[in-house]
Amino acid sequence: MSLYAMQKFLFALNREQEVQRRYAEGGETRATLLGAYDFTDEEREAIDAGDIGKLYVLGCNGQLLMHFAPLLGIPWADYLEAMREGVRKYGPVRAGIYAMTTGTDEKVAGI
């Protein structure tokens, strides 16, 4: 897994208008943008789909994701629920600061 690459991408996406434009354009433009990062197929698919829950489970920092969510048009309450749903759907957080030692219960680290 390339957690560093995902978080580096999200950091750039959250701050750079050109990266935001290329992501929002979709299609080949987005594919080229994402191709510049060392993602696994699973990571690339989650970022391309804007799957907040999957990205959270893959280990992305919530502070990076909380800025990605509005770019996707996701309100705050829905963002929090997306992380909870990610744990229910994909299992515990796999890496990073939010890695959990418990199962897939309703308690999600920090939310």
Image: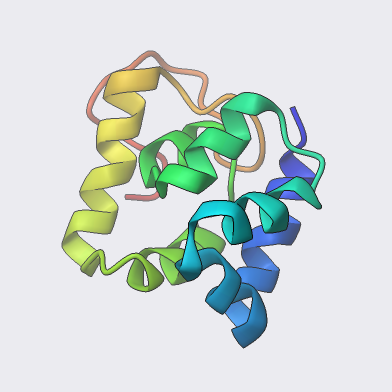
Query: Which residue: 73% across, 37% down?
Result: 39
Query: Which residue: 48% across, 32% down?
Result: 57
Between 105 and 11, the one nearer to me in the picture: 11
Between 76 and 35, the one nearer to me in the picture: 35
Quadrant the N terminus occupies: top right
**Percent of width and height locating residue 100:** 51, 26
Query: Which residue: 60% across, 86% down?
Result: 17
Task: Name the residue at the top extreme.
Answer: 103
Query: Which residue: 37% across, 64% down?
Result: 69
> In the picture provided, is 39 more to the left or to the right than 21?
right
Displayed quadrant of residue 75: bottom left
Task: Name the residue at the bottom extreme.
Answer: 17
**What is the count of numbered marks?**
0
Q: Is residue 111 above or below residue 101?
A: below
Between 12 and 17, the one nearer to me in the picture: 17
**Percent of width and height locating residue 88:** 27, 22
> In the picture provided, is 39 more to the left or to the right than 58?
right
Displayed quadrant of residue 109: top left
Residue 41 can be seen, yes or no: yes
**Percent of width and height locating residue 66:** 42, 65
Between 16 and 97, the one nearer to me in the picture: 16
Q: Is residue 106 above or below residue 49?
A: above
**Percent of width and height locating residue 42:** 58, 26
Task: Name the residue at the front extreme.
Answer: 28
Residue 16 can be seen, yes or no: no
